[in-house]
Amino acid sequence: MKRMKLINIFIVAFVFLIPTSVSSQTPVLETKVPADSLLEFELQLDSLRRYLKIPALSAAVVKNDEIIWANGFGYADLEKKVKATDSTAYRVASITKTYASTIIMQLVNEGIIDLEAPI
């Protein structure tokens, strides 16, 4: 169960938070966050990536519709040792179907959606 929650966090990061307009290799930071807090956050993200055996991860933090931090972790291409960046493109494939069906079933469990109701 804990692994599924962690995977869901990464799915959200991959699908919704991957920046498309940030292209620098270094993190974007437009807010006053202590450097040690940012480093700890990055270390935790990378540790989680390694724990889940995910080769690459890109993440971003958005505040007021602006990307205030973005970075890549791991390797986008393991064979060529190409590092992931904040703008690495990932293949989402069919994972969105699993994510959407999970959300729908959570809504069914909460009584918001009735699977027996006619469409």
Image (cartoon, rainbow, N blue to C red):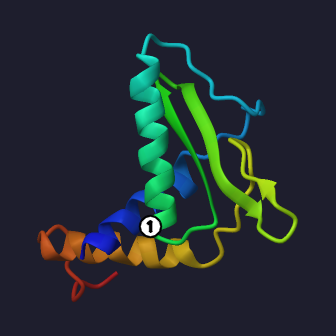
Identity of the residue drawn at 43% across and 58% down: 48
Q: Which residue is mark 1?
A: 51
Viewer-side residue, 20 vs 44: 44
Please state the horizontal and vertical placement of residue 63, each as a whole percent of the image. Answer: 45, 24
| The residue positioned farthest toward the top in the image shown | 32
State whether residue 28 is above or below residue 72.
above
- Badge 1 amino acid: Tyr
User: Residue at coordinates 45% horizontally, 55% vertically from top-left?
Assistant: 47
11 sits left or right of 82 in the view: left
- Where's the N terminus, which quadrant? bottom left
How crowded pointer 1 is (Cα within 10 Å; few <14, some 14-19, many 20+) is rated as few
Q: Is residue 72 left or right of residue 43?
A: right
Whether residue 113 is visible, yes or no, is no
- Residue at left offset 49%, top offset 30%: 62
Q: Is residue 13 above or below residue 76?
A: above
Secondary element at image label 1: helix
